Image: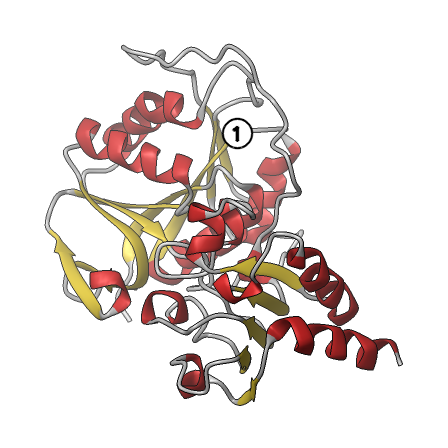
Amino acid sequence: MSKLSNIWVFSDIASRLPEMIAAGAALGEKVSAFIIGAESEITAAYALGATHVYYLGDKDSQKITEDYSHTIAQVIAANSENSLVLLAPTKRGKALASKLGVQLQAGVVNDVTEISVENGICAKHMAYGGLAIAEEKINSQVAIITLSSGVYEALPADASRTGEAVNVTFVEPTTQIKCIERRVKQGESVDLGKAKRVIGVGSGIGTQENLHVAGELAALMGAELGCSRPIAETEKWMERERYIGVSGVMLKPEIYLALGISGQIQHMVGALGSQTILAVNKDKNAPIFQYADYGIVGDINKVMPALISALKA
């Protein structure tokens, strides 16, 4: 397999950095990671497989991720003409990708599920709401990709690995969004892409109060709680980070239990990586049963208490 000479990686979420570095190691001879945070994170990046680290300094509460676009673009432009830049597919990651695309005159592809570098840089991603796979060939000198979670497995950390570190001077953006205040987001952050067991709830949950029952079931199963798009974006009963689907989280758990989810393709493309899919829906003709390994036709508000009782027994 041919490899690129250098891959640049950056993630605004620390938990995504290991798989970004693993992707870089699989696709390139050299992996250059941009790091923001404590200097100890430089050593951690080496242990994960980075060969070079460009240290952007400690976290500054007055800066947002996009403020670093000029700094990152300047480093990339000065060190390589032909480059691949891998970013996490978060809101901040995609915003950074768009700014870098303009500053480096680079092609950008979001939510990529497969990358090939054999005959140029080609990227596959979902299209038409998950009904098709599109393949794009990026012909610009710099290619920028936001990589979907779970595409690459993180490499085992090896403390003996080392590399080269460069301190980078921050370049002030020409126009900047001023951060007035930061507030802790309500609710706990979650990375469903790494969960071994996941319960997904859909519109069939009925009421927001019933989410507490689903949460109790999840706790007994040792599972994380996720949801379909209407629960997160229409009802706003759960955080956007828990939305499973084509433009949300791509799951790879051992067990996925879908409660009151019809099984439309836009949702299922985010769940098909599950080893075992279990479904509960009162409609025997629901599409979810075409994908499920095991299914129960019934009202989830009766099935959930029964499952809880069985697990407590």
Direction right: furthest residue: 313
Q: Look at 52% across and 53% down and name the residue there.
A: 49
Q: In screen coordinates, is 225 left or right of 139?
A: right
Viewer can see residue 175: yes
Q: Look at 67% across and 51% down and name the residue there.
A: 159
Give the residue type that dot 1 points to: Ile
Q: Look at 66% across and 34% down and name the residue there.
A: 40
Q: Foreground: 255 or 155?
A: 255
* Residue 185, horizontal then vertical, whole percent: 60, 32
Q: Look at 74% across and 71% down and name the residue there.
A: 221
Position above or below: 158 against 84: below
Reading the image, the residue beneath label 1 is 36
* Residue 271, horizontal then vertical, whole percent: 46, 71
Q: Foreground: 172 or 270?
A: 270
Viewer can see residue 124: no
Q: In screen coordinates, is 254 left or right of 252?
A: right
| Quadrant of res 172 | top left
* Residue 112, horizontal then vertical, whole percent: 30, 57
Q: Secondary structure at mark 1?
A: loop
